[in-house]
Image (cartoon, rainbow, N blue to C red):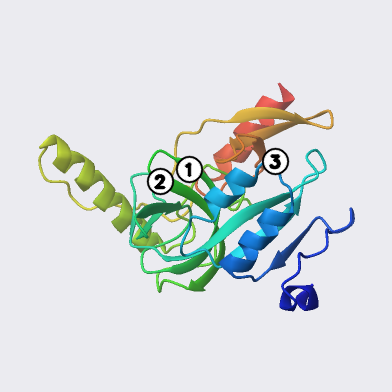
Amino acid sequence: KQSELAANKIPSKPSAAEPYIIILITTKIAQTVVAKTRCPRKSCALKLLGFKELTRFRFRISSRLNTHMIVPIVKIKIEKLDDDLCGVAFRGGKKYVVAKTLPDEEVLCEVKRKSGNAVICDVKEILEKSGKRVEPRCKYFDKCGGCNLLHTTHRNQLEIKTALIRRRFAALGFCAVSDAVGFSEDGSRNKTHIVFGNSKGQITAGFFNADTHEVVDVEKCLLHGEWYEKLRRILIDF
């Protein structure tokens, strides 16, 4: 693949056993590739090339369309968190929204879709981590949409929640808001919304995936505590 790239040739199409390849290429070469693939979605692909900060493309093979799909990868620095607690960055006149990131982090992210004036992304690699980032203790964190702050310290979680409530109340002209109080790092939630699914004939119970809305089978939740496990078992047996 590197020799083909060096010769400014179109990379050969991956085999069925090779679902995708990642190639570092320039915008000029990318335009050449798109122009020669006879892709029915050529206009869409060229539109994606409009991202000036685009530095990497992922070529995927669609068995249904048998065409190359180009997914842009952008490098951004998170500036703040929005009201959904997702990281926000501004670059090239565009607003990028990346879940499970923190302010001051520099990340490589993959563009998923546009929503209004925002570009929704998935984080692919964290180039520069925040000093407040920690390793999530929950094995479901990457899939489950039940919580979105386990990648930062408990103290910072409280500060983020306090800032969010103050921002919301300030817009309504309400009184001052005191600091959020954490009773404990685990088992602090006393309410849950369990959803159910079916996987290979087996009942699954847990929370929705934030992106796909598929049911993530969560047997144990750190934020709810032991009562969640007992309640989940009762509901499944019922």
- Spatial CA span between label 3 and label 1: 21 Å
Single out the mark in the foreground, 2 or 3.
3
Mark closer to the chain start, 3 or 1: 3
Query: In the image, what residue occupies the spot 55% across and 41% down?
Result: 210
- Split into 4 quadrants, where in the image is the C terminus? top right
Q: Are marks 2 and 1 in contact (CB under 8 Å)?
A: yes
**Amino acid marked by disc 3:** Pro
Query: In the image, what residue occupies the spot 59% across and 67% down?
Result: 28
Mark closer to the chain start, 2 or 3: 3
- Spatial CA span between label 2 and label 3: 26 Å
- Split into 4 quadrants, where in the image is the N terminus? bottom right
Query: In the image, what residue occupies the spot 56% across and 61% down?
Result: 73
Label annotation for residue 118? 2
Would you identify the image quadrant in which residue 92 lies?
bottom left
Would you identify the image quadrant in which residue 36 lies?
bottom right
Give the SS element for disc 3: loop
Percent coordinates x, y for residue 204 in the rendering? 72, 33
Q: Is residue 138 visible?
A: no
State the residue position of label 1: 114
Percent coordinates x, y for residue 190 in the rendering? 44, 37
Q: Are marks 2 and 3 in contact (CB under 8 Å)?
A: no
